[in-house]
Image (cartoon, rainbow, N blue to C red):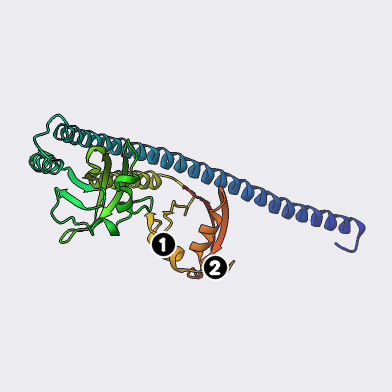
């Protein structure tokens, strides 16, 4: 067959057709693969964007609720301090000359001791930072010397009469008294000029943080439910962790160990560190092959950082 010209022509035409078919199949498969990868990438980006919107909105609502509760507590403290100030002014009235300033202060503190303050603590401090009266007997002059607020200010200095502004000042801090665990307190300090005293009012705000944590838990439960309903290719999944590497949304159990314990064969870094590094940009693509995966399967991670 190949000895004749006709046979040679048929052979070469067939060879060209076979090669063309192979090339067409290769490029068709490559184009289909690229198209599928592009579709998966678009899907991943859409999911990341959806999660970002959900987290941002839920977190904004959480902060708003927390702020509303804190403002309500602040107003409660200020009203209580102003009430004490008003009563102290009546005791310090110069018209009533039948008592000395020390007697007036003593009578005012006696009234304060019997005042009906529920869930609110009070402290009266003189200009030398000496504690004259307190609703909490475990609080001493030494208690506040070791305490700093969330702005890293020393509370004993914040409450000093000479340093307080006329309108007063607020502070949030944790306090530890004997026999009690740390409690977050919100306090308001108001100067009383007539006797050069500081009127301090405080309230436990642990319930605000507890409610915020409960809402955060519900947000994560909602995100987890949302992520499990997503269809991300054959073996895709959503995974979320915080800055301390605490898992917020779990990946499949066999994947979790890979991410947290395995090395990326492509970079020789831990997979977790590679994801965190990639997430520093807005949205990044990362490829990894897990050192714990015998199949050497290449995984693609689309990651985003949600501050």
Pointers 2 and 1 in contact (C-beta within 8 Å) = no
Label placed on residue 178: none
Q: Earlier in the sequence, mark 2 or mark 1?
A: 1
Task: Give percent across and percent down for residue 292.
Answer: 47, 70
Q: Secondary structure at mark 1?
A: helix
Task: Give percent across and percent down for residue 295.
Answer: 52, 67
Q: Secondary structure at mark 2?
A: loop
Furthest toward the right, the residue is 5
Tell me the quarter of the picture where residue 77 sits.
Answer: top left
Left or right: residue 183 versus residue 112 is: right
Label placed on residue 256: 1
Residue 102 vs residue 296, the one in the foreground: 102
Position of the N terminus by quadrant: bottom right
Left or right: residue 279 versus residue 214 is: right
Say if 289 sits above or below 97 in the image. Answer: below
Label placed on residue 269: 2
Task: Give percent across and percent down for residue 150.
Answer: 35, 51
């Amino acid at each position: 067959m190949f000895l004749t010209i006709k046979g040679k022509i048929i052979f070469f035409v067939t060879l060209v057709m076979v090669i063309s078919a192979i090339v067409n199949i290769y490029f068709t498969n490559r184009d289909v693969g690229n198209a599928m990868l592009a579709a998966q990438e678009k899907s991943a980006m859409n999911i990341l964007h959806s999660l970002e919107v959900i987290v941002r909105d839920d977190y904004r609502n959480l902060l708003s609720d927390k702020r509303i509760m804190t403002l309500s507590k602040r107003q409660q403290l200020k009203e209580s301090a102003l009430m004490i100030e008003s009563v102290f002014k009546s005791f310090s009235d110069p018209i009533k000359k039948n008592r000395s300033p020390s007697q007036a202060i003593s009578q005012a503190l006696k009234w304060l001791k019997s005042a009906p303050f529920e869930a609110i603590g009070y402290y009266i401090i003189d200009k030398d930072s000496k504690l004259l009266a307190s609703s909490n007997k475990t609080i001493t002059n030494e208690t506040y010397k070791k305490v700093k607020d969330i702005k890293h200010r020393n509370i004993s200095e914040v409450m000093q009469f000479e340093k307080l502004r006329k309108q007063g000042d607020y502070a949030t801090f944790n306090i530890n008294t004997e026999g009690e665990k740390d409690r977050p307190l919100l306090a308001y300090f108001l100067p009383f000029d007539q006797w050069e005293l500081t009127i301090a009012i405080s309230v436990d705000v642990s319930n605000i943080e507890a409610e915020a944590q409960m809402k955060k838990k519900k947000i994560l439960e909602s995100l987890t439910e949302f992520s499990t309903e997503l269809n991300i290719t054959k073996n895709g999944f959503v995974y979320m962790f915080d800055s301390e590497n605490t898992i917020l949304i779990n990946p499949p159990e066999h994947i979790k160990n890979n991410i947290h314990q395995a090395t990326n064969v492509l970079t020789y870094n831990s997979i977790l560190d590679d994801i965190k590094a990639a997430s520093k940009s807005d949205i990044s693509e990362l490829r990894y092959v897990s050192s714990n995966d015998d199949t050497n399967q290449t995984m693609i991670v689309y990651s985003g950082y949600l501050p």
